[in-house]
Image: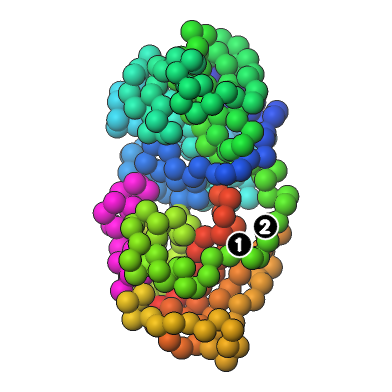
Amino acid sequence: MRKVYLALLLIVCSKVMIAQPFYRELAGFAIGQWKSIPNNVLGKPYLIDTTSIGISYEAFHHPISEKAVIVFEYSEEHKPIINSIHFSMMQSTEDAGFRGLQFGMHATAIKKKIGVPSDIVSIGEYGFRWDYESSNFFLELDQNNKLWGIKIFEPKANLLSPPNKNVVPSIQSFLLAAKGGSNESLIDLLAPNLQVIAFQKTYYFLNAWNIEKEFDKSPILSEIRNAATKSTFVDTLNFKTFKQSLIPTPNGLPKYQQIIKQSSPFKELHWEYLCGKYRLIFIRIE
């Protein structure tokens, strides 16, 4: 496995696409989750290594099948955070859990399902890599043109164009999702490494992303929903009750702090640009 992964990694690093929109979930996990979570959920990795260019990764057997392997990469700047997820299953017909694909699906069926790739790159004995310039994933097909691997990632190159502050979600849209939206719509506004401080108690997402989304194990979603039910209209044009400011960050990306002085238990929100959109990375509730 180490030989396979290192070979593919070198090929991938030689050509990384800037991609929109983003996919951040694969095989039950999400880009941006804490590095400790795969260990908590999947147990001890069977392989831990670092490439010559400083990318550390861990490989685990995935419980969906004895053939399933999932590899997490951690960036050099943010080693505690998952930077990419690679999910593979050789000689299998299992559901891949990604865009309606199945492992073992033939190239012809894949094209019908998600479209023609923008580029096809040979990866030697492992087959071919299919790139899609409109997104942040690629597929791997064997020499018989059957799907065996999927990878999602947030390429560093994408961070070179800072987003416009006007795409920061409004307080009202956040409250709407928190009060009556589904878990899916609410968690889409949240960063996987979100920190919530509610009445001096701190919460983090500590489980697989699909488990958090479905069962609210943290229970961050419940804390947010409870606070939202006590919130009334927040006048964002009144500087005495609401303030939004830009916070400098080491990576140069904009991060916005919103201070709410009345009408809501939410007192402080931090929005950071992650996986193609602004998401909440910090919430303080009082």
Residue at 67 percent across and 35 percent down: it is: 17
Label 2 belongs to which residue?
A: 163
Q: Tell me, yes or no, whether the two marked residues, 2 and 1, touch with CB atoms within 8 Å.
A: yes
Q: Which is more toward the observer, 284 or 6?
A: 284
Q: Residues within 10 Å of mark 2 (few under 14, many from 20)?
A: some
Mark 1 is on which residue type? Val
* Residue 26 at x, y percent in the picture: 43, 38
Residue at 50 percent across and 50 percent down: it is: 32
Q: Which is more toward the observer, 51 or 237?
A: 237
Secondary structure under tag 2 reads loop
Determine which quarter of the picture holds residue 178.
Answer: bottom left
Secondary structure under tag 1 reads helix
Residue at 33 percent across and 23 percent down: it is: 94
- Residue 254 lies within the magenta run: no
Picture mark count: 2
Image quarter hosting the C terminus: bottom left
| Foreground: disc 2 or disc 1 | 1
Mark 2 is on which residue type? Pro
Please provide the residue range marked out in magenta: 207-226
Q: Is the residue 269 above or below the residue 286 in the image?
A: above
* Residue 30 at x, y percent in the picture: 45, 46
Q: Do we see residue 120 in this rendering?
A: yes
Label 1 belongs to which residue?
A: 167
Q: Which is more toward the observer, 36 or 91?
A: 91
Residue at 57 percent across and 16 percent down: it is: 128
